[in-house]
Image: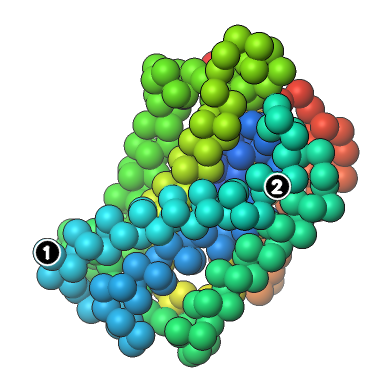
Amino acid sequence: MTGGQLLQAVLTGLSLGAVYGLVGIGFSLVWSLTRVLPFAHGDLVVGGALFAVLAVVGTTPVAVSPGAGRSVALVVLTLAFGVVLSVVSYGVAVRPFLDRAGHGEDVLGWVAGGVTAGLVIRTALGVALPAAAYAVPDPLHFDGFTSSGTVTLPGGGSVPVRVFPVIAVGLLAAAAVDRFLVRSRLGRAMRSVADDPDAAVLCGVPVERAVVAAFAVAGLLAGAAALLSAPAQPVGVDDGVVLGLAGAAGALLGRLGSPRGALAGGLALGVAQQVVQVAPSLGAAWSELVPLAVLVVVVAARPGGLRAPRQVAVE
């Protein structure tokens, strides 16, 4: 592996990891407040992108550059669908299995509910979009930053120009969530519920509102991840499953319950995946196994990690 190939893999991996990180932050927030693993979370990313495309473009999405009006509509609707799908999945598939303090006591119930919510999203998309995969237009027009759509790197490598704004937007979105948790009244309520839901109830903190807010923020991040990742390659209705597992692996790798850790874990996971892809004797087939392998190894190495105290760490 040459230096140019390594640099290319690192930059591409950071852009992929920024998407994993956003998914992982949402995963971590939901877990912190409810002790529920949101199994449908990856489907929110694909659902947000494809439902927005259905509303704006129709049933034959193509990778063309949309005009200003359609671009704004795609951005707004992708984010909105992410939020709506997340909140609805909470109300239908998670809330019935929580106690008054927001604990996910009925494990079998919320596991089945989360899996069912993901299946419903995929089935609805599959009915409207029966092809194996679709090219999604880029409403953010990242490829237009250069005439060729690529940037040449030292050492002979090259990367799509969209890699750099994807990294920047991913980091800014994660920083915005971090500031929201620290500075806003609702963010502080979410942190108090995550730290001690019973004490939060006694102090008059609106637990239900905080939990709904956590799902809404997770859905917003899923929509942002969709805007960053969907235009980069053809999207299939089942792609959310692997993306959700990768986000979960990033959250676990960076310490479940910590938004900053989820971002760091996602970035590390993305870089590792891309380095494996360009490594001699390995390649793309092996790189697809990296998120799943990391998920299995982290859970096996830290079996008590999923039983750690609830928290939204922002230090």
Q: Say which element carries label 2.
A: helix
4 or 190, which is in the foreground? 190
Crowding at dot 1, Cα within 10 Å, few <14 / some 14-19 / many 20+, comes out as few
Q: Is residue 140 visible?
A: yes
43 in relation to 89, above or below = below
Which residue is outermost to the left? Answer: 68
Q: Residue at x 44, y 54 (%)?
A: 84
**Which x, y percent locates residue 293?**
76, 57
Reading the image, the residue beneath label 1 is 68
194 or 106, which is in the foreground? 106
Q: Earlier in the sequence, mark 1 or mark 2?
A: 1
Residue type of the residue flagged with mark 2? Pro
- The number of numbered discs placed on residues in the rendered structure image is 2
Hey, which quadrant is residue 158 in on the image? bottom left
CA–CA distance between discs 1 and 2? 42 Å
Q: Which mark is residue 96?
A: 2
Q: Say which element carries label 1.
A: helix
**Which x, y percent locates residue 169?**
33, 45
152 or 256, which is in the foreground? 256
Residue type of the residue flagged with mark 1? Ala
**Which x, y percent locates residue 248?**
66, 49
Hey, which quadrant is residue 290 in on the image? bottom right
Q: Quadrant of the C terminus?
A: top right
Left or right position of 215 against 244: left
227 or 165, which is in the foreground? 227
Left or right position of 203 against 155: right
